[in-house]
Amino acid sequence: MAKPYNVLILGASYGSLLATKHMLAGHNVKLVCLPSEAEVINREGTRVRLPVKGRSGLVEIDSRKLPGTVSADVPTAVDPAEYDLVGLAMQEPQYRAAGVRELLDGVATKKVPCMSIMNMPPLPYLKRIPGLSTEGLADCFTDASVWRNFDPALMTLCSPDPQAFRPPEEKVNVLQVTLPTNFKVARFDSEDHTEMLRRMQAGIEAVRFDAGDGPTELPVKLKVHDSIFVPLAKWAMLLTGNYRCVTRAGARSIKEAVHTDIEASRSVYDWVRGVCIALGADPADLVPFEKYANAAQGLVRPSSAARALYAGAPNIERVDRLVQKIAAQKGMRNPVVDETVALVDAQLELNRKAAA
């Protein structure tokens, strides 16, 4: 095997899925997380459970049995210069937290290639989109200043299409995958950094895992794309499903958000696709509505954004507001999206007043 890469991933929940894929391919991963999470991961490793086509039940992948390694630490104990690639797997509001902010700035100033797997594309990535003005987008972020020192050429975006959650009855080192789709990452500006992603893709593709009855192919691959617009395909899904889990009556499941009024959902989805195409995306880079609607049949929980909102969070990722503002630059508006943004705004205002 080629020399393993050292990968730093900020966020040990969803980040443990990408970490597991890297470890299966022989790479070494450091997860950045809370002290209590780091203690469990360093003692017991991670467990990722995922459905595999043709098998009943879930396949569990125990990091302690993989060719690559995982360890975990708090943000202040990590030097990003020791890593070949940094993955951003926390929610966007978390990057302004003490310790995390300084680590993120270290990633920027030490010029380490950075791959975001947030739903919210970082500002430096948006700067890679030709013709898009990022000047008026700062208020879509909890604290846009954390991105100030990044070189856009060293930032890429990986669409977090796989769906996963931490089962509440399990320890914090367990992640369960509900929708085992692929991570779709855009190339870096640099051919050398893009080649690193392609090698990671090839290593993950080649993995065969023995769950006790012989080697089998696992879902959830890393797919590298030349188009910077491919990861933006997630926008239509988020605005059609995830943010429309927010209603005046409280949270509903993604399945309900999409299928309660399928034509309204189709209109929002097609409108967001239109925004991406207006920015320069090839329609072939985007996911058809029917494919998303079919996948949404299995998404029977409210989105993480909706759950956080109704749990009192004063800040959540605001892809809804971001897309609304980017669309406005192209003279595009959608009344359903406007209503969704207003609902989220109102609930956040209530949460902030309650927290004050």
Image (cartoon, helix red, strand yellow):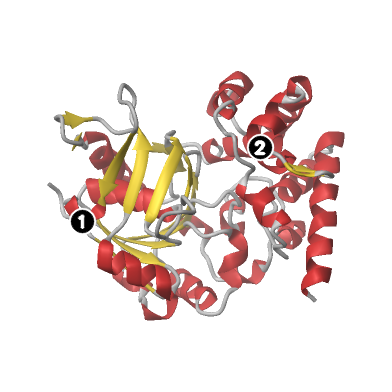
User: Mark 2 belongs to which amino acid?
Assistant: Ser
| Residue 334 in sight from this viewpoint | no
Query: Who comes first in sequence, dot 1 or dot 2?
Result: 1
Say which of 232 and 352 sits in front: 352
**Amino acid type assigned to the residue bearing label 1 in the image:** Arg
Locate residue 74: give its quadrant.
bottom left
With respect to residue 299, does 246 lie above or below? below
Specify few, some or many for label 1: CA neighbours under 10 Å numbering under 14, 14-19, or 20 or more.
some
- Which residue is tagged 2? 253
Q: Position of residue 343 (x, y in %)?
A: 83, 48
Q: Secondary structure at mark 1?
A: helix
Q: Gap between marks 1 and 2, in whole Å?
A: 35 Å
- Count the marks: 2
Residue visible at 46% across and 50% down in the picture: 167
Q: Report the quarter where the C terminus lies.
A: bottom right
Which of 285 and 64 lies nearest the eye of the viewer?
64
Classify 86 as above or below 22: below
In the shown orientation, is residue 11 left or right of residue 52?
right
User: Which label number is shown at residue 64?
Assistant: 1
The picture places residue 292, in percent across and down from the top left corner, at: 58, 26
Instruction: Sort mark 2 into few (<14), some (14-19) or many (20+) by Cα contacts within 10 Å.
Output: many
**Residue 62 versus residue 94 in the image, above or below:** above
Residue shown at the point (64%, 42%) measured from the top left: 302
The image position of residue 176, as x and y in percent, is 42, 44
Q: Residue at x 73, y 46 (%)?
A: 320
